[in-house]
Amino acid sequence: MSKVIANMSMSLDGFIADPGDGIDQLFGWMGNGEVEVPTAVEWATFRMSPASAEYMRSAMAGVGALIAGRHLFDITQGWGGRHPLGVPVVVVTHEPPADWPHTETFTFVSGVEEAVRVASDLAGDKDVVVASAKIAQQVLDAGLLDAINVDQVPVLLGEGVRWFENLGKAPVHLSDPTVIEGNGVTHLAYEVRRG
Amino acid sequence: MSKVIANMSMSLDGFIADPGDGIDQLFGWMGNGEVEVPTAVEWATFRMSPASAEYMRSAMAGVGALIAGRHLFDITQGWGGRHPLGVPVVVVTHEPPADWPHTETFTFVSGVEEAVRVASDLAGDKDVVVASAKIAQQVLDAGLLDAINVDQVPVLLGEGVRWFENLGKAPVHLSDPTVIEGNGVTHLAYEVRRG
């Protein structure tokens, strides 16, 4: 069944970016291995450890749509019109860009509940991935998040952007994770326990 | 060789206690299993999953001394004079208690470097465990921490006391962890990379 999954690379102390939105410290595992993992775009090909490559290929094959916040959309310049996952992207924003040409694969909506509804329709039987920290928090608060997949990086950043900074409803109980041990990353996949 | 290890139960979002120093959400794994793990004191016996019990027994056997902060010493009332690990305790404080009777197993020192030196002497060939968040940060900043053992609990607390709140020197790079999967906990043991 289709699930809504939040996925981030996160430092052990909970940061998903440095204070300037930089991610150099957190994405080394995507390029430090010998197994090539192509994406849907030419400008992004991963080279990972065998364990991470298998994990990533399986995860990528399961994704049917992506939800992003406006900030992520802006700093990536909308991934140049095509996300590396090759799936439709739903962007949560109150002010859709007026001149964005890639309307066939990008949809702009004004709230997270609408985003989940639209993305789930687009994903069909596949999963929806939430790729922005604040949006993930809002989806979690709305009771619509099924799983949290952490690519946990063995570094303490000390400062930056936290994944779970402003949870509206805590504590949030999770399952024990399934664990995949990579190189420069530990993949921890949790289910959100509701109720 | 003797190591200095910081060890805490921590939520996925980085908290080691709730805002009132409560730890109910984080220590369930110590009592939710079928394997009894006795400690050095009658008032504390753990009941853990087989995996956690084996991990804990091995960890306990390796500990030769403990470093605690004054706050932890106070809220536990000095563990009644004997720590469950049954090892000497070094308390970092600028004002040692005047009437503390258990001077044979408790030492009071005024700084973390002295604490590490005294605890290492007491531990001999065994390891030193740092059991307070702020003290662990100071030991890390002083370049004296060898390892970080996280008992990672599958919950998001949203607020409380963070383990790594005020790192003086970041980023801190760690090894990939060794992983032990328990019930209600994932034991992640990292080595601190210096340099």
Image (cartoon, coloured by chain):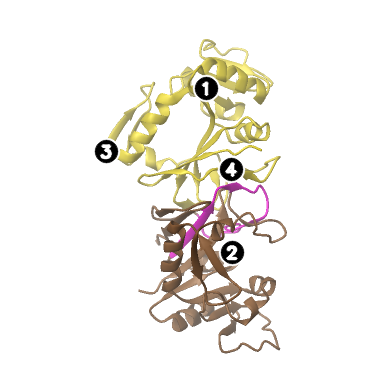
Chain colours: A brown, B yellow
Q: Horizontally, is B41 left or right of A101 in the view?
A: left
Chain of the residue under the numbered disc 2 shown in the image: A
Instruction: Give, as a three-letter code, the residue at label 4.
Output: Val
Where on the picture, by quarter, is residue B15? top right
Q: Earlier in the sequence, mark 4 or mark 3?
A: 3
Three-letter code for the amino acid on which mark 3 is drawn: Glu
| Left or right: A21 in relation to B100 | right
Q: Is residue A158 magenta?
A: yes
Q: Which residues are magenta?
A: A147-170
Disc 2/disc 3 C-alpha distance (Å): 38 Å
Give the labeled residue for mark 1: B78
- Marks 4/3 same chain: yes
Membership of A31 in magenta stretch? no
Marks 1/2: CA–CA distance: 40 Å
Secondary structure of residue under mark 4: strand
Q: Nearer the viewer, residue B78 or B186?
A: B186
Q: Earlier in the sequence, mark 4 or mark 1?
A: 1
Labels 1 and 2 positioned on one and the same chain:
no
Q: How many discs appear?
A: 4
Question: Measured from the top left, where is residue A136 in percent x and y?
Answer: 54, 66
The circle drawn on residue B34 is 3
Where is A102 relative to A131, above or below? below
Q: What distance separates the C-alpha of mark 4 from that of mark 1?
A: 20 Å
Q: Residues within 10 Å of mark 2 (few under 14, many from 20)?
A: many
Asked if labels 3 and 4 touch by Cβ distance under 8 angstroms, the answer is no
Residue A172 in view, yes or no: no
Residues marked 4 and 2, same chain: no
Q: Which of marks 3 and 1 precedes in the sequence?
A: 3
Residue at point 51%, 79% (across, down): A87
A118 to B144, vertically: above or below: below
